[in-house]
Amino acid sequence: MKRLVLYVKDKCPHCKDAQRYLDSKGYQYRLTNAKMQRGRKELDAIGARSLPVLKIGDRYMIGWNQKNFERMYKDS
């Protein structure tokens, strides 16, 4: 199983959409708040400036698009 990490912030509608989708499909993932020190540090390291960010294995997807996620998940 591929390791997933979802970086979000409170009151972000796209973050909520991504989280709802992952939950509805039964994906196991680590939820990380971008406002917390660990989340901010990890996002700064990759240069991400918008949310949500999904880490799929060792690849990153910035922003939420269900079809792009499914493709990246399948290909990684």
Image (cartoon, helix red, strand yellow):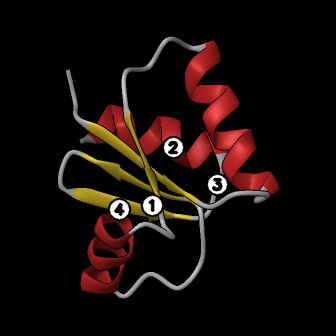
Name the residue beneath numbered marker 4: 60
**Can you say whether 59 is above or below 2 in the image?**
below
Question: Which numbered mark, 2 or 3, is in the foreground of this view?
Answer: 3
Q: Are marks 2 and 1 in contact (CB under 8 Å)?
A: yes
Q: Quadrant of the C terminus?
A: top left
Dot 2 or dot 3, earlier in sequence: 3
Determine which quarter of the picture holds residue 38. bottom left
Question: Could you tell me the amino acid type at mark 4?
Answer: Tyr
Left or right for 76, reference 29: left
Mark 4 → mark 1, Cα distance in angstroms: 4 Å
Q: Are marks 2 and 3 in contact (CB under 8 Å)?
A: yes
Tag 2's secondary structure?
helix
Name the residue beneath numbered marker 1: 61
Name the residue beneath numbered marker 3: 64
Q: Residue at x 53, y 85 (%)?
A: 49
Tag 4's secondary structure?
strand
Name the residue beneath numbered marker 2: 69
Tag 1's secondary structure?
strand
Determine which quarter of the picture holds residue 20. top right
Mark 3 → mark 1, Cα distance in angstroms: 8 Å
Q: Quadrant of the N terminus?
A: top left
Whole-percent x and y of residue 35?
51, 70
Q: Residue at x 42, y 66 (%)?
A: 36
Question: Could you tell me the amino acid type at mark 2?
Answer: Phe
